[in-house]
Amino acid sequence: MRQVEPVPPALQPGDAAFLDFDGTLVAIAARPDAIAVPPGLVPALEALHGRLGGAVAVVSGRSLGDLERWLAGFPGSLAGSHGGELRGAGRQGPDGAVIAALHEAARRAGAAERLLVELKAQGAAFHFRGRPALGATAAARAAALAAAFPGFAVQPAKMAYEVKPADARKDRAVARLLDMPPFAGRRPVYVGDDATDEPALAWVDGRGGVAVKVGPGRSAAPFRLEGPAAVLAWLKGEGA
């Protein structure tokens, strides 16, 4: 990976925009349910949807239902659970009984260590943002949970470790969407902030698209925006 600095070029009518949610469109909060969606975000996404002929997708580790609640009114595509859920494509992913068992195991593990547990449609996450000293404990609990459920893997995130289906990845979500209208034939533009976004950033950059890292840290992306406020300004065509 390389240290990156340049701001991205302005979005063009022939682009397809793929946007992470937490840390990219909204600032990360102490708890997943404590985020604040900027008042101008959904209107800006709606305007971008019009400018790009509908080729705008939010690609997130959050559950699809969670995205639909926070982005009510956004008409574009939503890919939840790292691409494991796609609005309008029907239910995919692990069996419901498996997820219920995983959730119960995650609850027990979190209670034993006083970790904040986020239950997701296709997995669970152990958060330690409020208690950084529990980082190693969260990692160990996530590893044990993934080992107990075949087909699941640990995904490091910002101050969290998530257990999710091993084949649910954001680069695969982008590739899938690019085979579908209205995304097909367009230049992909991906904007994301953490380790869960790096596969998609590298994939887009390697195929002649525009990969944008949000915030500090090393990345596969050659462009950078400072944070969600800069992302919103850039999406609106106001610069970084």
Image (cartoon, rainbow, N blue to C red):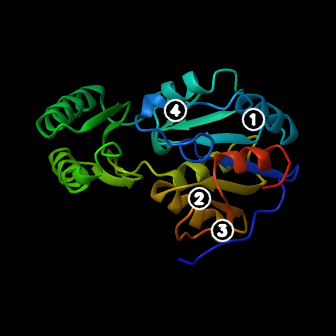
N-term mark: 4 or 2: 4
Amino acid residing under circle 2: Gly
- Distance from the alpha carbon under mark 3 to that under mark 4: 29 Å
Residue 180: image location, x then y, percent: 68, 43
Q: Considering the image in quadrants, where does the C terminus appear?
A: bottom right
Residue 144: image location, x then y, percent: 15, 50
Residue at label 4? Answer: 35
**Apparent side of residue 14 relative to residue 161 in the rendered image (left or right):** right
User: What residue is rendered at 65% in x and 57% in y?
Assistant: 226
Depth check, mark 1 against mark 4: the one in front is: 4
Residue at label 3? Answer: 205
The answer to whether marks 3 and 2 mark residues whose Cβ atoms lie closer than 8 Å is no
Amino acid residing under circle 3: Asp
Depth check, mark 3 against mark 2: the one in front is: 2
N-term mark: 1 or 2: 1
N-term mark: 3 or 2: 3
* Residue density around tag 4, few if under 14, some if 14–19, many if 20 or more, within 10 Å: some
Could you tell me which secondary element the residue under label 2 belongs to? loop
Amino acid residing under circle 4: Ile
Could you tell me which secondary element the residue under label 1 belongs to? helix
